[in-house]
Amino acid sequence: MGDSEAMVAQGYTSASYGEYNASAAVTVESTGQENASLVNGTGPEGGSVENGKASDKVAVTAPAAEHGDNAVSTLSPEEERLWSIVRANSSEFNAWTSLIEETERIAQDNIAKIRKVYDAFLAEFPLCYGYWKKYADHESRVGAMDKVVEVYERAVQGVTYSVDIWVHYCTFAINTYGDPDTIRRLFERAVVYVGTDFLSSPLWDKYIEYECMQQDWSRVAMIYTKILENPIQHLDRYFANFKELAETRPLSELRSAEESAAVAAASDASKTAPSESDGKADEGKSQADGSSEQSPKLETAGSTDPEELKKYIGIREAMYIKAKEFESKIIGFEMAIRRPYFHVRPLNAAELENWHNYLDFIEKDGDFNKVVKLYERCLVACANYPEYWIRYVLSMETSGSMDLADNALARATQVFVKRQPEIHLFAARLKEQNGDIAGARAAFQLVHSEISPGLVEAVIKHANMEQRQGNLQDAFALYEQVIALEKGKENSTILPLLYSQYSRFSYLVSGDAEKARKILVEALDHVQPSKPLLETLLHFESSLPAPRQIDYLAPFVENVINPNADTQNIASSTEREELSLIYIEFLGLFGDVKSIKKAEDEHAKLFRRSTSELRKRSADDFLSFDRTKMAKTYNGTPPAQPVSAQAQWSGGYAAQPQTWPQAQAAPAQPQQWNPACGQQAAYGGYPAGYTAPQAPAPVPQAAAYGAYPAQAYPAQSYAPPVASAAPVQQPATAAAPQAYYNTYY
């Protein structure tokens, strides 16, 4: 057996492609087959797909190919242009495909140049099984069979759960090698990973075709037996074909060696069974001798024995019936999967929801192997969506499979959704929970420095973590560093939020009112007064003992509510009205009659609302616009539509008052957030019906403070499954109100 032939039979292990080779995987029991390691592949792509179409968030590092400098140094102007595009933005899929086409046109037989472009492209898009096939064809054209095998082995590491790539690989082996054992071992490797895929029929058909060419009928029967155990597409056809085979071939040709041995053992046992008397024993011996003489005839007749044939088919029919029963439960989910392959285009909402429902069902069914393989299938089509990666990690963590959870989290953060901040914030939380504080800090730092600098949610969560670790000064320093960076930018939209949050954080965790006031006063010196900043000031003043600085606050509030022609106004009409209502309520608690009348008259003039209309509104209505936006982070409630995490924070913060707790004369310990401060002095005029705000839900915000640069990332909500066997339940109604501050753990 040559080197390449051994590689086909045993798998390619001479090089590690990226972080996710077989050594990083966990052994999972396969249904009725040998144990198999789950490598870095993602869910199957079964069925007919658009050749070469894949997502831009997947990468496995290809090995450094030996590209000769002279062979690849000469580039056409078009190649130079396209290389500059993909170097600047490696996720530019259309530029990559154009570059491949141009290189193939120019390079012709220059295999080094072709290897360079394919290695680079497939490092970013390893789920493009069509391009793996084209790469292998190029190697085959120049006669490098060992390189063809190497390409296919890299392919089945990069997209392990693709039926199509395994079919291509097995077809290559059939056309290349003459050793049936080598080819059979490759088929068996394939069916371990994708043999239970609902769309695995092309692979099974190729396997049956090969064994029929070999006329090894016992192996053909064995393949049908494996197929009938699983609820896959075209199961009726497979059962009909099996029955036809059984009825046209002798049973002696269909039984495996183990089955033949079992039948022979049963026959021997019946021959030697003890009799009740010596006479009966002799009679039995005589019958046994007669039976022995007839056995060659029976063996030749094979399937002509109706009882034996009926029993043989009946065993497989029972498997078929059981598989059909399960198929009836999943067929609705399978038919709703319109795009089982990976593509750069987003999926529609119905298909995304279908994947969640399908995962719920399989987790409830309780078969861990099915759960893992369905997640891997899902993460082909949904690899661009952090919510499915987070759900997979949480499911594996709940089931106790920490190796699988860690492997999935590494793939998500380093390869598939590495450019999306949600996954890194989730990774930081998970690492902190597992005691890896250094890893959590690294995840936050990656967001601060590369993924989304200035992301307010990341700053809040990082500072909170440092505070939990007892590093309060580090938390303060983090806010100050980010504020200093934003102050250097012209018209920073997140600076007011940072000041507001820093002041609030300082007061809540240390009880230092003077420090909190100093932060807000500094903010007014450096930023244009805005609704969220002034809202924070009003809440802060309401939480402190008398006297309140109403005269100090009034000009700032009035300039935002009623800006003049010379005043730069960054507040929308809705924000101005909301701030006016909050200010009126603040004055109702702490102002005098004159100031209240002035504010109400100004409000009626600016926003066409009379004083009597205003009085009819309950305080609960003041925040009704905000309550529709509330949702818990990672609570299983799906967002209404994608929006950036920063927009979630800024939108919610800007649209709702932040209740400061009642100050004590000399606070002995950090103040705690009190969700029950209905009619008390912490902005105390709310009626008993008011409940503390929750975390804002992802709703569109009009140029809110600090949205993600360049594109909006889908906001996610998840709940860890109770057990791997149980589905992740989606709450039917809105969650009960929770303390706002607690949602940022």
Image: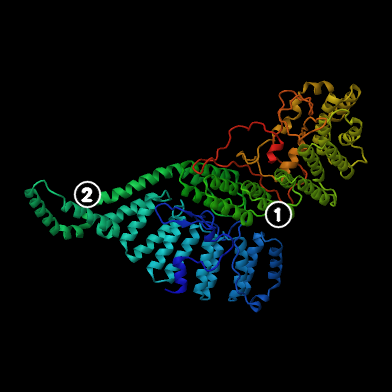
Nearer to us in this view, 539 or 730: 539
Mark 2: few/some/many CA within 10 Å (<14, 14-19, 20+): few
Image-based side of 615 in relation to 394, left or right: right
How many C-alpha atoms fall within 10 Å of the one at disc 1: few (<14), some, or many (≥20)?
A: some
Q: Mark 1–mark 2 contact, CB under 8 Å?
A: no
- Where 678 sits versus 188, above or below? above
Q: Is residue 506 above or below residue 240?
A: above
Q: Amino acid at mark 2?
A: Glu
* Disc 1, SS: helix
Residue 377 vs residue 369, the one in the foreground: 369
Residue marked by disc 1: 446
Q: CA distance from mark 1 to mark 2?
A: 69 Å
Q: Residue at x 40, y 64 (%)?
A: 184
Q: Is residue 344 visible?
A: no
Most foreground residue, 719 or 252: 719
SS assignment at label 2: helix
Mark 2 lies on residue: 307
Q: Camera-side residue: 36 or 631?
A: 36
Give coordinates of residue 240: x percent, y percent.
34, 51
The three-letter amino acid code for the residue at tag 1 is Leu
Residue lying farthest to the front in this orientation: 668
Could you tell me which quadrant the C terminus lies in? top right
Residue 250: image location, x then y, percent? 25, 58
Where residue 702 sits in the image (x, y, percent)? 76, 42
Q: Quadrant of residue 697?
A: top right
Task: Point out residue 598 in the picture as x, y percentages from the top left corner.
Answer: 90, 26
